[in-house]
Image: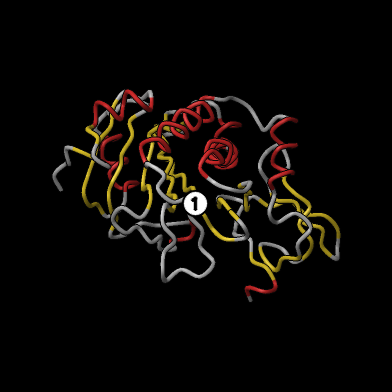
Amino acid sequence: MPAATHYAGIDDAAIAARCGVRRVVLFDEVTSTLDIAHWLARDGAPEGTLILAERQTAGRGRSGRAWRSAEGAGIWSTLIARPTDQAALDVLSLRVGLATARALEAFTAAEIRLKWPNDLVLDDGKLGGILIESRWREERVDWVAIGIGINCRVPRDVPHARALREHVHRIDVLAAFVPAVRAAAAARGALTALELHEYARRDWALGRRCTSPAAGIVRGIDARGALLVHTSSGDVATRTGSLIFEEDS
């Protein structure tokens, strides 16, 4: 699949300068920007390489779910990072979520909230999602691909989806959130007290009754990124699965 020369009317060099990254690779159409990121990273692409596509034919979310990626309807992106700190890697999705939510609020009329482990929520509807895929070499991470999809127009066939404000320029959005994501990817250690406080303020699931990954009341997250659920047999912490609520069943 040949690379494109422009994205949203801007060439790769100009986008790289706006976003503060070393390299930008543009496509009209890909299966998924995550697929391209892994291919480029295996070939030695540097940390900070940004992949953008106008449309994806097989965009994906958590647990293999499809992500609608129509042309011009959103930002379909993946950033290559090469973190070395395991504690930071454990919470990378949550830290990236916090950074992205802060940056995107310049383009929304309301506060962006977070649904563990990787959804961006606006007015109780999904604005976007984050999917992080790691590739390992023996006992260490060789690279991670940080996939971020954001709706710029509300998809017609996705119930309760949300989008950024009308007439927002995608390059302005990229220039806001890409540096924030790079800073999040460079951070070390578990979530700080300040990050936990901010997450609690943005936590869309806090206090809601869920049926999975454990049945009970959501109590938040811990510094290692685990979901905390108060169940009939006591509090549990889980790092796997997806949040499902009674009304979703």
In this rendering, the answer to whether 118 lies above or below 94 is below
Residue at x 35%, y 26% (from the top left corner):
18
Residue at x 24%, y 52% (from the top left corner):
30
* Mark 1 residue type: Gly
Q: State which quadrant residue 147 falls in.
A: top left
Q: Which residue is mark 1?
A: 129
Q: State which quadrant residue 169 falls in.
A: top left
x, y percent for residue 150: 44, 50
Q: Return the residue found at the far front.
A: 167
Judge by depth and name the residue closer to the eye, 36 or 23: 23
Q: Return the residue found at the far left.
A: 2
Judge by depth and name the residue closer to the eye, 198 or 110: 110
Which part of the image, by quadrant, shows the C terminus? bottom right
Judge by depth and name the residue closer to the eye, 99 or 215: 99
- The answer to whether residue 134 is left or right of residue 30 is right
In this rendering, the answer to whether 62 lies above or below 102 is below
- The answer to whether residue 224 is left or right of residue 216 is left
Q: State which quadrant residue 206 falls in.
A: bottom right
Residue at x 85%, y 66% (from the top left corner):
232
Q: Which SS class for mark 1?
A: strand
In this rendering, the answer to whether 30 lies above or below 170 is below
